Image (tube, rainbow, N blue to C red):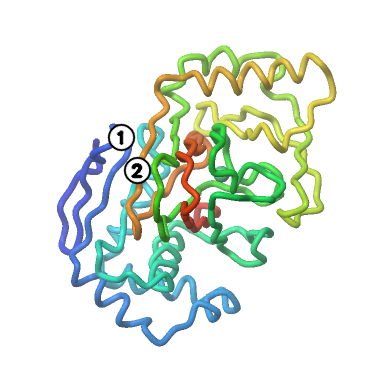
Amino acid sequence: MSFVQTQAGYKVTPHPQHNRLYHIVLDNSVIEKFLQEFSGTGIQHLEYTPYMRFILAGKLRDLLGTGFLETLRNILADRQSGGFTIGVQGQTTSLDDYVKFGTAVSHLIGPSNFDAMSGTYYARFVVKDTDNSDSYLRQAYRLFTLHTDGTFVDEPTDWLLMMKMEERNAVGGESRLLHLDDWEELEQYATHSLADHKFTYKSPSSKNVGQVVHRPTFFKVNNKPCICFIDQFVYPATIEQSHYLMAMSESLERSPATNALKLPEGDLIMLNNMFWMHGRAAFEKNTELYRELMRIRGEFAKS
Ligand SMILES: [Fe+2]
């Protein structure tokens, strides 16, 4: 836990629920000043004017120092960790404020990807009792298998942010997380003859991505294996390839190292998308279930 520290305006602490993650605590006055500064800025302005997203990030950097930005980037790049949580600490319950805060934190790390599902740089999606969509994203009572994001788009997806916007009548539904180095059978699948085979990825129509991309399941960054995988969007061409993918997904699902993390409203998690896999536990049946998440994905800044 080499990034644990106390600085003016913030503290980096070990995460209470996961031994690889950090939880960052801000001084409430910092959150208040940040929100105050942008109280007149509408969300639509962030959607339409990309530089505003970095202007928000810049305010956090001004309030907390360059060391804060460097610490967040270093945590996400650190193979031992690669993730942290942070939140608005009850200083606001406005969903617009949540979007502004999540935008600022994520843009300290780098530019966001275009999210074709929403047509802008972030997506908000609701899970309820009933669903008629075309992927498992919104199906409440089904476990969502471990995967990485950005499999079917051309841009690099180095990091992922998930923020809890609202949650009512929800039991279960936690984020399931697995760090690749905690997966017992990593070696077996990462060195398999199909590990670097370029599989075809296509998305369902709701994602609005007409593109087809070809990606290897395993690739190396700093000489360590990284992964790109989601069972729903990969199109194998043979029986052997299908056996490899199914056995791997089942091995991931069996791993006792998978941790179900509870995220309070107004908190967000950022993860390195190359060596962390994520999914969702099933919710318990409730006709009044309502949960909304925001996601942002993007690249590491080049400078
Ligand atoms: Fe995902």
Is disc 2 surrounded by few (<14), some (14 to 19) or many (20+) residues within 10 Å? Answer: some
Foreground mark, 1 or 2, reads 2
Q: Which mark is residue 262?
A: 2
Q: Amino acid at mark 1?
A: His
Where is residue 34? Give x, y as percent.
30, 75
Q: Is residue 87 above or below residue 279?
A: below
Q: Residue at x 49, y 72 (%)?
A: 53
SS class, disc 2: loop
Place residue 96 in its image quadrant: bottom left
**Image: 241 above or below 164:** above
Q: Residue at x 63, y 33 (%)?
A: 229
Cα–Cα span, label 1 and label 2? 11 Å
Name the residue type under label 2.
Lys
Using the image, tell me which numbered label, if any, was put on residue 18: 1
| Residue 15 coordinates in the image, percent (x, y) | 26, 41
Name the quadrant containing residue 235.
top right
**In this rendering, would 280 be left or right of 206?**
left
How far across and how far down the image is residue 152, in percent? 71, 45
Left or right: residue 3 compared with residue 164: left
CA neighbours of label 1 inside 10 A, class few (<14), some (14 to 19), many (20+): some
Q: Is residue 52 left or right of residue 197?
A: left
Secondary structure of residue under mark 1: loop
